[in-house]
Amino acid sequence: MPNHPLFLAAAVAHGVLSLGHTTKGIEQFKHPSLKQVPALLRSTVQAGWYEGSLFFAIVAVLNYKWSSTGLVDGPDKVLAGLVTSLLFGFGANYFRAGDKPTAVTLAIVGVIQALGAKRAAL
């Protein structure tokens, strides 16, 4: 049993985000309008999208580690804060763009991340 179950929940959530992000990218990159975008730009946008998917996978592994260890030092606390900031920041961006389901999903994971960090830092 993990010492910090909210981090375990965040790990699972980030794993799901990684898969969902990849799936969404595959679907979005099929959109016919992207053929009008120059090849170099289209390629870099796709690479950046999949970097985002790998980011979620990396954060899933980090949260899994934290579920056992907690936040052991300053860099762990900074990383947890940065991840939380990214989740809320990009959630707000998706909300402004009209993608409310993604915005809500990121906000929920952000809350789990923030609560896990708060409890693990005590």
Image (cartoon, rainbow, N blue to C red):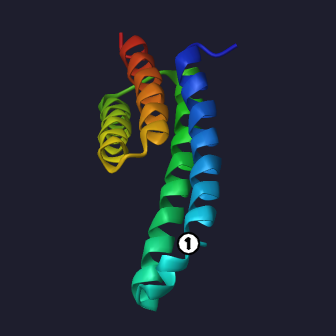
48 displayed left or right of 26: left
Residue 54 point in image, percent of width and height: 55, 56
Q: Quadrant of residue 86?
A: top left
Q: At 41% across and 85% down in the image, what residue appears?
A: 37
77 displayed left or right of 56: left
> Quick one: label 1, few (<14), some, or many (20+) residues within 10 Å?
few
Q: Quadrant of residue 61?
A: top right
109 displayed left or right of 29: left
- Judged from this view, the residue extending furthest toward the right is 1
Residue 30 point in image, percent of width and height: 61, 72
Q: At 59% across and 33% down in the image, what residue appears?
A: 13
Q: At 37% across and 32% down in the image, what residue appears?
A: 80
Q: Circle 1 sits in a helix, a strand or a loop, which is it?
A: loop
- Residue bearing the label numbered 1: 31
| Residue 35 or residue 24, whichever sits in front | 35
| Residue 75 or residue 37, whichever sits in front | 37
The count of marks equals 1
Relative to residue 18, is residue 10 depicted above or below? above
- Judged from this view, the residue extending furthest toward the bottom is 39
Quadrant location of the N terminus? top right
Residue 43 point in image, percent of width and height: 48, 81
Question: What amino acid is at disc 1?
Answer: His
| Residue 73 or residue 37, whichever sits in front | 37
Residue 11 point in image, percent of width and height: 59, 32
Relative to residue 116, is residue 102 depicted above or below? below
Q: At 30% across and 40% down in the image, what residue appears?
A: 92
